[in-house]
Image (cartoon, rainbow, N blue to C red):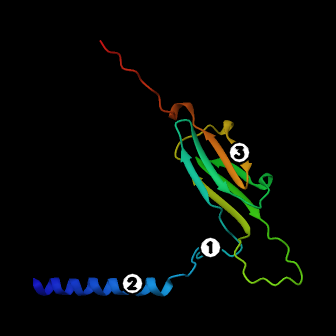
Amino acid sequence: MAKDLMKWTSVSSLQNEINRMFDQFFRGWDFSGFGTEAGTWAPSIDLAETDDNVVVKVEIPGIDPKEVDISIQDNNLIIKGEKKEEKEEKGKNYYRMERSYGKFSRSIDLPSSVDVNKVKAECKNGVLEITLPKKEEVKPKQISVKVS
């Protein structure tokens, strides 16, 4: 039994050492675009829920909010648009380009059923805020207890 325990400890130590080496080797590398199609990006979102609403905030700086398509299908909020690349100026030497451009599409599963006829969207300072009121039947109801 002690021999089996020693083998297990050695394998575990080896695995830990390999993990440490990979972490050290890849430290500082940016994998944020890994697995995404070139020319596409996805804006960051926040999704929150209150008793009455589902609220989605989407970062879309540099995009005309009128050119963003918002729809709801099968309890999924779908947001589509495009961040167009600024035209490159002649004679300008770029030392670093980190901003992302291209078409995007986000599909967000909504945590509750919403009333699609009362959805509101507003954009302020590059943040699109979509307020989706919940249907009446899914809102929590307070039930009072009668004391006899």
Q: CA distance from mark 3 to mark 2?
A: 46 Å
Q: Is residue 130 left or right of residue 25?
A: right
* Left or right of 81, for residue 18: left
Query: Does label 1 or label 2 sit earlier along the sequence?
Result: 2
The residue lying toward the viewer, choosing from 38 and 52, is 52
Q: CA distance from mark 3 to mark 1?
A: 28 Å
Mark 1 secondary-structure assignment: loop
Residue type highlighted by circle 3: Ala
Crowding at mark 3 (Cα within 10 Å: few <14, some 14-19, many 20+) = some
- The residue wearing badge 2 is 20
In this view, the mark in front (3 or 2): 2
At 41% from the left edge and 87% from the top edge, which residue is drawn?
21
Quarter of the image where the N terminus is located: bottom left
Q: Amino acid at mark 1?
A: Thr
* Residue occupying the point 33% across, 83% down: 16
Helix, strand or loop status at disc 3:
strand
At horizontal 58% and vertical 78% (from top left) the residue drawn is: 30
Q: Secondary structure at mark 2?
A: helix
67 to 21, vertically: above or below: above
* Rendered location of residue 114, percent (x, y): 59, 40
- 146, above or below 117, in the image: above
Mark 3 or 1, which is nearer the eye? Answer: 3
Q: Residue at point 74% right, 69% down? A: 102
Q: Is residue 148 above or below residue 66?
A: above
Q: Position of residue 82 (x, y in %)?
A: 75, 63
Which numbered disc covers residue 121? 3
How many other residues sit within 10 Å of disc 2, few (<14), some (14-19) or many (≥20)?
few
Whether residue 110 is visible to the viewer of this picture, yes or no, is no
Q: Quarter holding the C terminus?
A: top left
Disc 1 + disc 2, Cβ < 8 Å: no
Q: Which residue is mark 1?
A: 36
